[in-house]
Each structure stands twice: as structure tokens, then as C-alpha cells.
């Protein structure tokens, strides 16, 4: 596997593991944070997670575009569309929910965050599966002399 394929696969794996941690541990734990401490904690969380997620998502977007331009096959199109979906879900759904939570602890918003984040979890799972299939089955993305 060449450096580009390794890098893309590593980024996809990192984002999938990160979204699993967020979905299964971090977001559900929001409901247990003390109401009076929630705003400060949430603000700190958003800043810290953003430092990880924004660069990884940006690299993933660039990688999916490079792959699409390199060979527009079904796998690269699906991956690009799934990456685009994660961006749209993040910007149009998750960011507004987090902005509402910046106002303070709200169980209804926390539950909505957990429920809707399954869409991103699914999308990042699809992205990782797509990358694994490309690495295993497509000579363009697998070992080259």
C-alpha cells in the first residue's frame, strides 16, 4: 500500500474510532454532568474535540477528492458522498445542537444529539468500510511496485 492510501486509511480509521467514542461514551455522558458545571465543561469539550476533528475531517475531505479525481469509480464516488454527508451533518445538524447546549444543560437536546449522531457514526463506518474495500480490491489503492 502506498503512502497516500495508508494515510487515507489511517485518517478514516481515526475518525471512525473517534466517532464511536463520542457516540457511545462522550455524548451519553453529557446527561450526567452537573447542571451548574455543564456550560464550562461543554465549552472546553467543544474546543478540544474541534482541535482533533477539524484537521482530520479536512484531510479526509481532501483525500476523498484526490481519490475521486484519480479514479472516478463507484467506491470513490460513494466515499466522497459519505464524506460530504459527514460535513453536512456536522455543520447543519451537530453544530447548531452544540450551540444550543452552550446555553446550558438540556436533556432533550442531549438526547437529540445522541440520536442524530448515529447518522454520522453510520457515515464514518461506511467511509472506513469503503476504504478497506478499496485497499483490498483495487490495484490503484493497494500495493504497487
Image (spheres, rainbow, N blue to C red):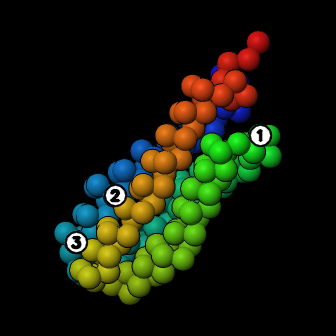
Can residue 95 be spotted in the picture? yes
Distance Cα–Cα, label 1 vs label 3: 45 Å
The residue tagged with tag 1: helix, strand or loop?
Answer: loop
Q: Is residue 115 left or right of residue 139?
A: left
The residue tagged with tag 2: helix, strand or loop?
Answer: helix
Can residue 3 be spotted in the picture? no
Residue 85 horizontal/vertical position (percent): 56, 63
* Residue 126: assigned label: none
Discs 3/2, front? 2
Q: Residue at x 61, y 33 (%)?
A: 134
Q: Residue at x 48, y 76 (%)?
A: 93
- Quarter in which the C terminus is drawn: top right
Q: Dot 2 corresponds to which residue?
A: 23
Q: Nearer the viewer, residue 39 or 31?
A: 31
Contact, mark 2 vs mark 1 (Cβ under 8 Å): no
Distance Cα–Cα, label 2 vs label 1: 33 Å
- Quarter in which the N terminus is drawn: top right
How many residues crowd around disc 1 within 10 Å: few (fewer than 14), some, or many (20 or more)?
some
How many residues crowd around disc 2 within 10 Å: few (fewer than 14), some, or many (20 or more)?
many
* Residue 31: assigned label: 3
The residue tagged with tag 3: helix, strand or loop?
Answer: helix
Q: Dot 1 corresponds to which residue?
A: 71
- Which image quadrant for residue 108? bottom left
How many residues crowd around disc 3 within 10 Å: few (fewer than 14), some, or many (20 or more)?
some
Is 63 rendered above or below residue 23?
Answer: above
Q: Earlier in the sequence, mark 3 or mark 2?
A: 2
Amino acid at each position: 500500500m502506498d503512502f497516500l492510501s495508508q494515510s487515507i486509511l489511517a485518517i478514516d480509521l481515526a475518525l471512525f474510532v473517534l466517532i464511536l467514542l463520542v457516540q457511545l461514551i462522550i455524548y451519553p455522558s453529557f446527561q450526567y454532568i452537573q447542571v451548574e458545571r455543564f456550560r464550562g465543561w461543554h465549552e472546553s469539550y467543544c474546543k478540544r474535540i474541534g482541535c482533533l476533528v477539524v484537521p482530520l475531517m479536512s484531510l479526509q475531505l481532501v483525500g476523498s477528492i484526490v481519490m475521486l479525481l484519480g479514479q472516478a469509480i463507484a467506491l470513490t464516488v460513494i466515499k466522497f458522498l459519505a464524506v460530504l454527508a459527514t460535513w453536512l451533518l456536522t455543520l447543519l445538524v451537530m453544530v447548531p445542537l452544540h450551540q444550543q447546549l452552550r446555553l446550558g444543560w438540556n436533556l432533550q437536546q442531549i438526547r437529540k444529539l445522541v440520536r442524530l449522531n448515529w447518522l454520522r457514526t453510520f457515515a464514518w463506518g461506511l467511509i472506513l468500510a469503503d476504504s478497506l474495500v478499496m485497499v483490498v480490491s483495487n490495484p490503484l489503492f493497494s500495493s504497487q511496485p
